[in-house]
Image (cartoon, rainbow, N blue to C red):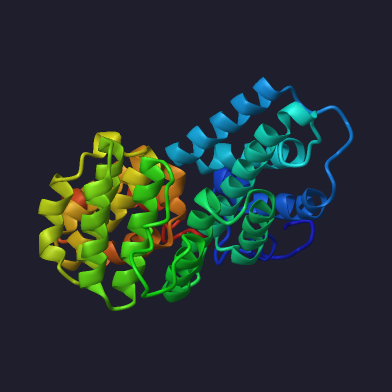
Amino acid sequence: ADALRVDPGFLTGQPYPPSNASQALVTGVTHRIRRLVGRIALPPDAQSPVPLDEAEAAVARAVATAEDGDESALASTLPELLAGVATADSPPTERARRKDLGCQVLLLAAGLLRRLGHWDLAWTLTHEAEQRIGPGGGVLLEQARLLCACGHPDQALARVARGSGTAPGDRDPFDDVQPDQIRDAELASLVAVAQAITGHPGTAMRTVDSAERRAGSPAALAVLAATRVVLAVESGAVDKVHGLLDAVDQTTLAPADRASLLVTAAAAAARQDAIGDAVIHLTEADRLAPLRTGLDPFARDLLIVLPTHAHHADTSPALRFLADRAGLSPHDPGSR
């Protein structure tokens, strides 16, 4: 940015410049991925691919990194994975497994780009994954998430209905969806939130109830219990959030999911003027996944608003620390 004499935001596509090296790495990965998109759509490279066991281990590490909410480590890994795993040719006996690994990488990259707000490029990657393995499973989930992020929950619901072989309003869209338990819970969670946003809170609660009856693992139940917290905030029942939060077995949630839940709980606490509780939730979210939390637009909004409502001196140092981590200190141009 200095060499070109432009604002860093012009290069990163973000509404604010990165405040540290980790943020810069994450926001700058978009351009590295964009350069690879054309190559991903081409026929696989003829060169010898990375051995299958090494590719599987690398993708497993990337999945774990995403679940941990370590956006910096994920951003540093994805371009190499996209250039290798997602584009490499393979022997016929390995082709199906390598195709699946490549799609996992595409969806990991799409998820990161979605969180950064680069929805056009994220959609391109989900489309490429859909071309390879079809519209179900992780592709359906990521596309529905992307549509919700774009402000189209109605289209997300229609996309889930089409992907599960049902028509919107026809019958329970999960009748034909048979993914693994945790993915089923994530899809149910997404649909319930979309239903609440579109003005159908009763339907949203029935969706969660139905999914809980099918859930077969503590992790799936925790995802759905966390969804009830989000639904309470969405419907304005912030007084119920504390009790609902206590009902969530957070030990079974991935750190990134726990951090997201705590940001939601912080928002509910702030709306009740419980600033101390909001700061506690944000501090824990920052401990679990600092960069994921620091780049979350909702967490950033809270860190801008909360200092004006903080009435106790003991909350100020914690708020200043969190604001500094996110690059939102008053002296920082990123706070404007």
Q: Is residue 237 above or below residue 102?
A: below
Residue 303 in view here: yes
Identified at 76% across, 63% down, the residue is: 5
Q: Is residue 334 above or below residue 43?
A: below
**Residue 209's spot in the image, x, y percent?**
21, 56
**Residue 279's spot in the image, x, y percent?**
24, 51
Identified at 21% across, 51% down, the residue is: 315
Q: Is residue 260 above or below residue 335?
A: above
Q: Is residue 144 left or right of residue 32?
A: left
Relative to the observer, which residue lies in front, 19 or 188?
188
Identified at 68% across, 36% down, the residue is: 96
**Residue 177's spot in the image, x, y percent?**
42, 53
**Residue 304's spot in the image, x, y percent?**
35, 64
Q: Is residue 161 left or right of residue 49?
A: left
Relative to the observer, which residue lies in front, 104 or 28?
104
Q: Is residue 294 left or right of residue 283?
A: right
Residue 336 in view here: no
Relative to the observer, which residue lies in front, 14 or 239?
239
Kindly indicate the quadrant of the structure image that contains residue 13.
Answer: bottom right
Relative to the observer, which residue lies in front, 45 or 278?
45
Kindly indicate the quadrant of the structure image that contains residue 61.
Answer: top right
